[in-house]
């Protein structure tokens, strides 16, 4: 059986805002070109900050920090990567603007919590991934992050607040989660 364990990790999600509407009105060539450039730009940032790319789902990127290699600063590394990604989007948009394309913006959500991590699947296809309520919460926070913003949960904030500049954000009422969630917006230092 695959070995799985429960541990506290930091989970990152990002999405391109207005993606579906954009793909419906843009030329297929433009969509393909820009998505390829976007997806080429992100993995080096994930690697640089020690993240594990879980998956690309359409325009969504899911990354986790703190496994397989332990990293006691997993929350900080996730937030630093998020800021780098927003900076990278600014650079991509500048290059796209020169080619006459409208900008694309990503919203980012980050949460630190206990998850089950390990290899799941069949003998033919094993996927190293994470499961649990903390993953769901990270995804829900991300769904409420406006383009260009990085929102983090209270738990993540408690781990990074000494090293990262943040500002309070209105609590989020999230689908499937009973209590309003305290979140913070990360602002560029």
Image (spheres, rainbow, N blue to C red):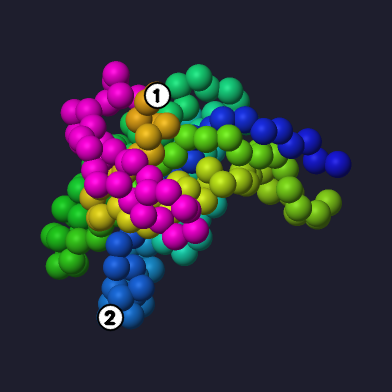
Number of the label disc, if any, that sits on residue 159: 1
- Whether residue 39 is visible to the viewer of this picture, yes or no, is no
Rendering coords of residue 158 (x, y %): 37, 26
Residue at the image point whose x is 80% and y is 40% from the top: 2
Structural crowding at the residue carrying mark 1, measured as other residues with C-alpha within 10 Å and reported as few (<14), some (14–19) or many (≥20): some
Measure how far apart labels 2 and 1 are at the Cα level. Answer: 42 Å
| Secondary structure found at label 2 | helix
| Secondary structure found at label 1 | helix
Rendering coords of residue 108 (x, y %): 34, 48
Question: Left or right: 91 with respect to 117?
Answer: left
Q: Name the quadrant containing residue 163.
A: top left
Considering only vertical position in the picture, is 60 above or below 26? above
Structural crowding at the residue carrying mark 2, measured as other residues with C-alpha within 10 Å and reported as few (<14), some (14–19) or many (≥20): few
Disc with the residue nearer the chain's start (2 vs 1):
2
Determine which residue is flagged by label 2.
Answer: 25
Comparing 182 with 132, the one in front is 182
**Mark 2 or mark 1, which is nearer to you?**
1
Of all residues, the one furthest to the right in this rendering is 1
Rendering coords of residue 71 (x, y %): 52, 22
Q: Please state the extent of the stretch shown in magenta in the rendering.
A: 160-189
Residue at the image point whose x is 33% and y is 56% from the top: 144
């Amino acid at each position: 059986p695959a070995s799985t364990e429960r541990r506290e990790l930091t989970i990152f999600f990002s999405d391109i805002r207005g993606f579906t509407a954009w793909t419906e009105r843009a030329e297929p060539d433009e969509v393909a070109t820009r998505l390829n450039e976007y997806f080429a730009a992100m993995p080096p940032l994930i690697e640089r900050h020690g993240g594990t790319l879980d998956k690309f789902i359409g325009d969504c990127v899911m990354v986790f920090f703190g496994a397989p290699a332990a990293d006691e600063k997993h929350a900080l590394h996730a937030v630093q990567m998020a800021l780098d990604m927003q900076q990278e989007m600014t650079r991509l948009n500048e290059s796209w603007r020169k080619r006459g394309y409208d900008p694309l913006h990503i919203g980012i959500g980050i949460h630190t919590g206990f998850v089950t991590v390990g290899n799941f699947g069949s003998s033919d296809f094993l996927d190293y991934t994470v499961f649990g309520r903390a993953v769901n919460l990270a995804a829900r926070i991300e769904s409420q992050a406006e383009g260009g913003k990085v929102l983090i949960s209270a738990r993540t904030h408690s781990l990074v607040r000494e090293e990262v500049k943040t500002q309070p954000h209105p609590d989020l009422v999230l689908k499937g989660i009973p209590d309003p969630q305290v979140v913070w917006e990360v602002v560029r230092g």
